[in-house]
C-alpha cells in the first residue's frame, strides 16, 4: 500500500482524524501530510492535526492536540460526561502546575493548574460529540472539582450534575468519597450525597 493511502486509511480508522505523531509513529515522513493537503485529500484542522475533507472539525480534539498536557475539566468535563446538557461557553482545561499557561489562555481556554498527584487523579478517555477520543477527568473527580470554592461553578449546574450522577448505574460512591477527602470538599460532598442517595 502506498504511504499516501496508508495515511488516508489511518484517518478513516480514527473517525476522519490523523495526527502528525500518528504518522511519525508508523514510520512515515510528516512531509507527506503537506502533500496530501496540497492535493485536497486532507485538511489541516490545527497544528499537527489533519482531517479528511468530509469530516467535521472537532474543537475538543484540536485544542487537546495543541495543548497535549491539558485535561478537560469542570463544566467542559461535565458536558463530555453528559452530566449537564449545557454546552460550555468556553473550554476549561487543567494543566500541570509547572506548565506555562500563556498560550492556552491566549486561545481563550479557561485554565486551572494542579500539582501531582492531583493533576493525574481521575484522568480518563472520553468520546466527544463528534465521536473522537480525548482526555478528561472522570465523573467523580469532576464532581469534587466543581465543589471547590475557587472554581466558582454556578450552583444550578452543580445540583443538576449531582442529580444526573445519582441516576448512573456505574457511579462509584467510594471513589467519589476518596476524591472528596483528597480535594478537601468532604463536607460539601456529604451534603449533596445525603439529599440524593
Image (spheres, rainbow, N blue to C red):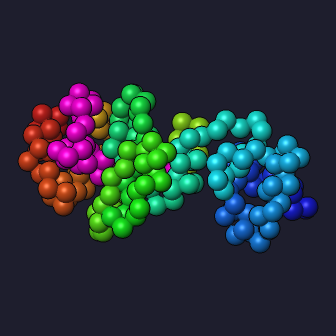
The residue lying toward the viewer, choosing from 60 and 9, is 60
Check the picture and name the quadrant holding the C terminus.
top left
The residue lying toward the viewer, choosing from 88 and 168, is 88
Q: What secondary structure predominates along the stretch shown in magenta?
A: helix
Q: Residue at x 29, y 52 (%)?
A: 141
Q: Quadrant of residue 5?
A: bottom right
The residue lying furthest to the bottom in this view is: 27
- Which portion, as a residue range, is magenta? 134-160
Q: Along the horizontal axis of the image, is 190 left or right of 10?
A: left
The residue lying furthest to the right in this view is: 2
Q: Residue 104: give x, y in percent of width and height.
A: 46, 51
Q: Quadrant of residue 192?
A: top left
Above or below 131: residue 84:
above
Whether residue 104 is in magenta: the answer is: no
Q: Residue 38: give x, y in percent of width and height.
A: 86, 48
Q: Along the horizontal axis of the image, is 157 left or right of 10?
A: left
The residue lying toward the viewer, choosing from 157 and 115, is 115
Whether residue 144 is in magenta: the answer is: yes
Q: Residue 16: give x, y in percent of width and height.
A: 71, 45
Amino acid at each position: 500500500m502506498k504511504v499516501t493511502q496508508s495515511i488516508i486509511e489511518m484517518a478513516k480508522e480514527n473517525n476522519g482524524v490523523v495526527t502528525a505523531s500518528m504518522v511519525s509513529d508508523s514510520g512515515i515522513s510528516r512531509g507527506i501530510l503537506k502533500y496530501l493537503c496540497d492535493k485536497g485529500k486532507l485538511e489541516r484542522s490545527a497544528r499537527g492535526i489533519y482531517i479528511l475533507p468530509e469530516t467535521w472539525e472537532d474543537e475538543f480534539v484540536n485544542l487537546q492536540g495543541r495543548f497535549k498536557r491539558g485535561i478537560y475539566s469542570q463544566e467542559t468535563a461535565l458536558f463530555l460526561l453528559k452530566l449537564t446538557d449545557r454546552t460550555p461557553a468556553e473550554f476549561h482545561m487543567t494543566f500541570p502546575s509547572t506548565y506555562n499557561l500563556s498560550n492556552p489562555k491566549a486561545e481563550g481556554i479557561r485554565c486551572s493548574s494542579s500539582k501531582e498527584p492531583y493533576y493525574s487523579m481521575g484522568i480518563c478517555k472520553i468520546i466527544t460529540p463528534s465521536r473522537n477520543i480525548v482526555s478528561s477527568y472522570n465523573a467523580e473527580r469532576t464532581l469534587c472539582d466543581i465543589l471547590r470554592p475557587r472554581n466558582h461553578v454556578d450552583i444550578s449546574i452543580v445540583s443538576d450534575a449531582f442529580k444526573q450522577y445519582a441516576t448512573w448505574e456505574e457511579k462509584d460512591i467510594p471513589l467519589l468519597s476518596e476524591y472528596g477527602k483528597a480535594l478537601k470538599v468532604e463536607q460539601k460532598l456529604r451534603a449533596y450525597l445525603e439529599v440524593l442517595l
